[in-house]
Image (spheres, rainbow, N blue to C red):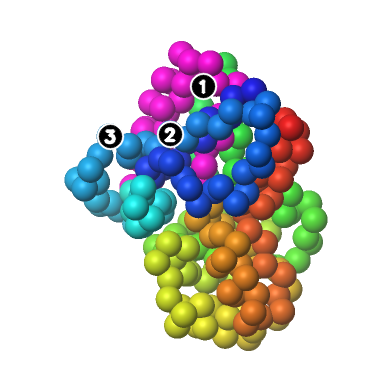
Amino acid sequence: MKLSLVTIGQAPRTDFNEFLKENSSIIIEHIGILDEYKNDFPKPVTDNILVSRLKDGGQVQLDKSFAVEKVKDTIAELEKGDTDIILIACTGEFEFFDSTKPIIYPDKLVGNIISTVFDEKICVLVPDKKQVDYIIKKWDKVGIDTVILDISPYNYTEDDIDRVAEELNNLEMNHVICDCMGYNLMFKNELQKRTNKNIILSNEVIFSNIFALIS
């Protein structure tokens, strides 16, 4: 079984390692839509952006329209190979791509699970303020009312964590979904030290379900 992770940044996504189970029957490959770029990344020209990780751990912002086209091209290349399942390693909202290979869309997986389990308003963390309106609409499509807070999963500071924790503690809601695959266990643990809210990582939801199905 070969699982291809398509990130909208650069590969490899070493920050995913803590979520990936060691399993000799599963081969995991990482492909980034920016792998061919050095430092000349295309800069966003709209506020409709996606945020991802570079090979050096830094953050990059891309116009969503650019990312969609690059993901489409990457899937077309994977169609020619021996991959069995494709994971779009981004919780941004994507339309279904044409493919003979099964494609896992994290925004649909996470959104459907959260909306099934929780019938209440939740807080959603996103990497950038520009994404707030888009994320509200995304979660509204699965019937979830949200309050959105922004904090980068790639270059946050202690002050950023303190700010978000204070805002969370002033909210009358119990659950927080980290709506980006850049949020990791270290981030969750640091935030959990400062709040008693239920912090949910998208990565934990995504990879636990994937490995439950294909392991």
Residue 111 visible at all: no
Q: CA distance from mark 3 to mark 1?
A: 23 Å
Q: Earlier in the sequence, mark 1 or mark 2?
A: 2
Tell me which segment is drawn in magenta: 63-91
Q: Quadrant of the N terminus?
A: top right
Kindly identify the residue that appears in the image at 60 percent across and 62 percent down: 185
Side (left or right) of 56 relative to 125: left
Residue 72 visible at all: yes
Callout 2 amino acid: Ile
Residue 114 included in the magenta stretch of the image: no
Circle 3 residue: 36
Determine the secondary structure under disc 3.
loop
Q: Is residue 103 above or below residue 189?
A: above
Which of the two marks, 3 or 1, is nearer to us in this view? 3
Callout 1 amino acid: Asp
Callout count: 3
Q: Earlier in the sequence, mark 3 or mark 2?
A: 2
Q: CA distance from mark 1 to mark 2?
A: 18 Å
Tell me, for residue 31, which label it has, or none. Answer: 2
Residue 147, image x, y percentages: 59, 70
